[in-house]
Every structure is written in C-alpha cells, then in structure tokens.
Image (cartoon, rainbow, N blue to C red):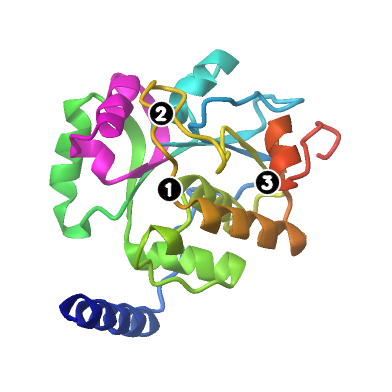
C-alpha cells in the first residue's frame, strides 16, 4: 500500500513539475549539418560506409573505446550516466578504466545534481577524463527530449518507461538537426559491452524497440551500420549512398 502511494505521489510531482518548468531538451554546442554516428557499447559495431572527418560522433559511456580503431582520437560529444563517475558496479568501474586519460568535445552527464558541479568535475579528474565543455542534463530535460522528438511522454518511473542512453543520443542528434543518424553498437537484443566481459543484460529493451519502430515509421532519418541489427529491428542499413 505504501509503495503504491509513494509511486502515485511521485507521478503527480513529476507531471506537475514538468508542466510548470516546460524544459527545453539539451542543445548541442553546434547545429548538426552532416551525418551523426551514435556509437553504443554493444559487443559488435562497425565503422559506417563512407565515414570521413565530416561525420560527427556521439559516444555513450565507455563506447569511446570503439572509435580509436577508426583512427579517431576523441568524439565530438559523449553522453554519460551520473553513476559512471563514482559508481562501484562492475560496469561503472570498466567505463572509468577505458576512459582514463581520454578526452571528448562536449560531455553531457545525465541526472547529476546541477548544484553539485564541483563534485562532478572532481570525479572526472579522478580518472583523468578531459573535455572542452561540460553540461549536466536533468531528468526533465531528458523527458523533454523524448517528448519533443518522438511525442512520447514518460515520467521515468522505472526502467521499462525509459529509453537507453544510446537512444537518448539518437533523439539528441535528431533534435539538433542531424540530416542522418547512423547507429552502431546499439542493439537492444544483445547483452554485454564491448569494453568488458561481464555479459550484463541490457535494460530498456522494449522501450528502445518501440521507439526505433516509431521514429522510422514517422520518416526520421535513422540508419544502422550493423547488418544484423538492420535485419532484426528493421532499421535501414547505411550504405554511404544514403547521404
């Protein structure tokens, strides 16, 4: 009974706060005018056909380890969950390990307290992760991203009602004008991560699948560089001639 009441109160609070705040989704440091590659951490990923320096790259958590094989030193943008900075889970520890000594252009950290920026900066220094610009994205800005691009309202009450950071990166790219978004290393059907061997099960699977299907059916320019993902989820395969 108590849990039901608590959930109801949380729903009412978040709904009212979202309506009152009317937040804008997070903005990119520049307008995207060329294809954007969103690199996730699924064990299999591929460099998109025709990839060159004009493409913009968004990496998610520890997936920056993938692009080094493409000859790219740093992504334009990295999106990271707050718990990767100080968390003690196997995944968080591995993310910090692969990012140690690396850098990015703009770093967006999701759900960190905006009034505790100094602690975030200290946490990033602890594993020597550098950035040109640091942005904190709160829950309501993330909710606005899903609402504005996909016209879906989520109060983020549980894992099933949220999309993954990889899909948040896709929404972010679309919101900020990307003429094409190419995903690689993003497969809701997979388990595990490219940078470790723990084989962790993926969260947000059903929401991600639903969101992908909705965005494609509405004509958003989403592609994948991974043939199995194209076959399994019906995402058009990027050929380079799509540009």
| Mark 3 vs 2, N-terminal side | 3
User: In the rendered image, which residue does mark 1 sit on?
Assistant: 203
On the image, which quarter does residue 60 sit in?
top left
Q: Which quarter of the figure has residue 152?
A: bottom right
Q: Is residue 145 left or right of residue 130?
A: right
Separation of residues labelled 3 and 1 (CA atoms): 31 Å
Residue at mark 2: 199
Look at the image and say whether residue 83 sits in the magenta stretch: yes
Q: Position of residue 170 (x, y in %)?
A: 57, 49
Q: Is residue 236 left or right of residue 103?
A: right
Residue 188 included in the magenta stretch of the image: no
Q: Position of residue 167 (x, y in %)?
A: 53, 50
Q: Position of residue 147 (x, y in %)?
A: 52, 71
Determine the residue positioned at 48% across, 48% down: 29
In the rendered view of the protein, which quadrant contains the N terminus?
bottom left
Question: In whole angstroms, how far apart are the C-alphas of marks 3 and 2?
Answer: 36 Å
Q: Nearer the viewer, mark 3 or mark 1?
A: 1
Residue 100's x, y, as percent? Answer: 29, 21
- Measure how far apart labels 2 and 1 are at the Cα level: 12 Å
Instruction: Please give the residue where the numbered disc 3 appears in the rendered image.
Output: 33
């Amino acid at each position: 009974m108590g849990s039901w009441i608590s959930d109801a109160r949380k729903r009412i609070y978040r709904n009212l706060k979202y309506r009152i705040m009317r937040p804008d989704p997070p903005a990119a440091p520049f307008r995207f005018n060329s294809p954007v590659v969103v690199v996730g951490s699924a064990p299999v990923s591929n460099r998109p056909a025709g990839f060159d320096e004009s493409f913009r790259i968004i990496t998610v958590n520890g997936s920056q380890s993938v692009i080094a094989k493409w000859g790219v030193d740093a992504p334009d943008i990295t999106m990271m969950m707050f718990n990767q900075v100080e968390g003690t889970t196997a995944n968080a520890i591995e993310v910090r390990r692969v990012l140690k000594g690396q850098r990015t252009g703009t770093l967006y950290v999701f759900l960190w307290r905006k009034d505790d920026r100094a602690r975030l900066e200290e946490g990033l220094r602890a594993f020597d992760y550098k950035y040109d610009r640091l942005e904190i994205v709160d829950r309501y800005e993330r909710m606005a991203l899903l609402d504005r691009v996909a016209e879906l309202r989520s109060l983020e009450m549980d894992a099933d009602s949220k999309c993954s950071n990889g899909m948040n990166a896709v929404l972010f790219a679309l919101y900020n004008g990307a003429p094409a978004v190419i995903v690689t290393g993003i497969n809701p059907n997979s388990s595990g991560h490219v940078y470790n061997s723990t084989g962790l099960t993926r969260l947000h699977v059903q929401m991600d699948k639903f969101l992908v299907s909705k965005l494609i059916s509405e004509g958003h320019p989403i592609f994948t560089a991974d043939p199995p993902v194209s076959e399994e989820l019906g995402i058009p395969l990027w050929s380079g001639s799509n540009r």
